[in-house]
Amino acid sequence: MLTIYSDDHHLHHGTAELIDGTLKPCFEMPRRADMVLERVRKVGLGDIAAPREFGLDPVLRVHDAGYVAFLETAWSRWSADGRSHDALPLVWPVRGLRTDRKPQDIDGLLGYYSFDAGVPITAGTWQAIRSSANVALTALDELLRSQRSSFALCRPPGHHAAADYMGGYCYFNNAAIAAQALRDQGAARVAILDVDYHHGNGTQSIFYQRADVMFLSLHGDPLVEYPYFLGHADEPGAGEGLGYNHNYPLPHGTDWARYQQALQDACQRIADYAPDAIVVSLGVDTFEHDPISRFKLKNDDYLRMGELIGRLGKPTLFVMEGGYAVEDIGINAVNVLSGFESVAG
């Protein structure tokens, strides 16, 4: 399986995030991607290539132009006030506050375009997120050319980013950008399967009213787990998208036996939908030792996960999302890919 990877991800290295009421070193760190790449090489998964430049047009097919412009200029506006530390939001437009008047000040804009304080912007963030999108688009391009499957080793991740807001370590929604590019290049239907521990709220919101992209997410129950305000089972889609959004909220302590049941149901729904291709938001923070998650999957369970996805027999793009048990992230991510290849050929 071909892996697309860029060293540009090192340019984004936040100092701290607000979690558990305190500023702590970011769990989303460059070493995450480094460990996955190391494992790809160690097992001989396949060739590794650099991304090509696709420009912003594919990004703007998914993301609001004002939001993209904000991300491009955020660091320069932040640092213009003499600040050299990470840019983090200060205030959010919650219920009762106005959202029809966009602030002009960078501190207001950071809140306007985010939903949490887990998205530090640094001097290198813009280049890193541009490259991460290009990684996904290049992996997709290779999939369409000749590959049965491909792996976009994206960092920063993307599935919490919606059309016009960032959050949860995510700025550009790489999986959504790739899915839209598939549609734009002729795919009649695309399925996005999100196996990250946290609900892909951004991806859901982007495609919620569409029937041409089915979204399925297995994740911690939002009643007790981030992102809290989306990801319930009673969110089936709306308008033309009614019936094309499927959430599988699962309780703390979920092991493979319970997880497998939900995944099998999701795979059957994908098979019935008969998409031309599948995009997998590959988060491995479902691991039993992940520091910010509460599922109980073991290393070998990721092989079985890959096998189930591989049996769908569809061209499949894997897009890296979460996973924060750094020593095991490479093992678990590559196990999914290896399991897929063992049955997909």
Image: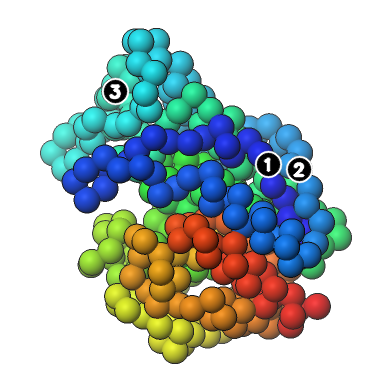
Residue 122 visible from this viewpoint:
yes
Instruction: Indicate the quadrant where residue 112 lies.
Output: top left
Could you tell which of marks 3 and 2 lies nearer the N-terminus? 2
- Label 2, on which residue? 50
- Label 1, on which residue? 6
The alpha-carbon separation of the residues under discs 3 and 1 comes to: 30 Å
In the picture, which quadrant includes the N terminus?
bottom right
Find numbered disc 1 in the image and state the secondary structure of the residue it sits on. Answer: loop
Residue ID at (57%, 80%) = 300
304 vs 170: above or below: below
Residue ID at (64%, 52%) = 153
Viewer-closest of 56 and 125: 125
Report whether 17 appears left or right of 299: left
The alpha-carbon separation of the residues under discs 1 and 2 comes to: 6 Å
Could you tell which of marks 3 and 1 lies nearer the N-terminus? 1
Report whether 339 appears left or right of 244: right
